[in-house]
Image (cartoon, rainbow, N blue to C red):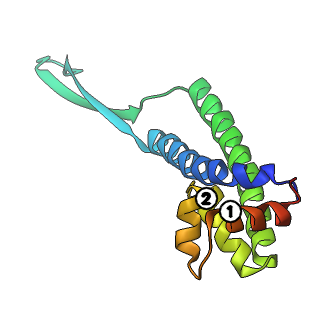
Amino acid sequence: MDKSILYQYIDACELIKDTEKEIQKIKQKRKNIVQDKVKGSMYDFPFAPQSFVIHGIEYSEGDEKKLREQEQLLEEQKAAAEAIKLEVEGWMAAIPMRMQRIIRYKIFEGLTWGEVAVRMGRKATMASVKMEFQRFMGEK
């Protein structure tokens, strides 16, 4: 697996959350019913004034098409982000637990090598943790 996808994992997780919020906004817009009151007169004599309440949705048929297209694009975007997330999580489950912790601390949480060494414990030093990571990832 390409190491760069590890850095995309964080963005993929955030993108999924943001996309879900946008999809909810679209769905809420479809449910939003507006109402208004108008005044008129009776149809027959004595033509007394009357009030009427009008209910409806706040968008047109053309707007509905745009909303469907926008929702479809958001769903595709979310699916792509979920694919990256699943790929990384599957790969992470297959590597040694110690390396999972190092990757989680360094890449996903953004800690410094010194902070990673402290979290790793057991006499780990900044240089040893960094070297272990570099060897595992095949860096020179």
- Counting from the top left corner in percent of width and height, residue 108 is at 61, 58
Q: Is residue 23 above or below residue 135?
A: above
Is there a contact, CB below 8 Å, between mark 1 and mark 2?
Answer: yes
Of pointers 1 and 2, the one earlier in the residue sequence: 2
Between 40 and 97, the residue placed more toward the observer is 97
Inspect the image, locate mark 1, and give the three-letter code of the amino acid beneath it: Ala
Quadrant containing the N terminus in the rendered view: bottom right
Q: Secondary structure at mark 1?
A: helix
Question: Looking at the image, which residue is at 74% across and 55% down?
Answer: 6
Picture coordinates of residue 139 (x, y %)? 86, 54
Q: In which image quadrant can residue 41 be found?
A: top left
Q: Write down the quadrant of residue 124 in the picture.
A: bottom right
**Which residue type does callout 2 highlight?**
Trp
Residue 113 vs 59, above or below: the answer is below
Crowding near the residue tagged with mark 1, few <14, some 14–19, many ≥20 C-alpha atoms within 10 Å: few
Position above or below: 39 against 34:
above
Q: Which residue is disc 2 drawn over?
A: 113
Residue 114, how many percent across, how many down? 56, 61
- Secondary structure beneath dot 2 equals helix
Estimate the spatial distance between the alpha carbons at disc 1 and disc 2, rounded to whole Å. 8 Å
* Residue 114 vs residue 2, the one in the foreground: 114
Q: Residue at x 87, y 53 (%)?
A: 140
Direction from residue 45 to residue 98 in the image, left or right? right
The front one of 19 and 65 is 19
**Dot label at residue 127:** 1
Q: Residue at image x 33%, y 34%? A: 34
Residue 137 position, x and y percent, is: 84, 61
- Labels 1, 2: front one: 1
**Image quarter of residue 130:** bottom right
Q: Residue at (70%, 78%) from the top-left corner?
A: 98
Q: Vertically, is 131 above or below 79? A: below
Label 2 crowd (10 A; few <14 / some 14-19 / many >=20): some
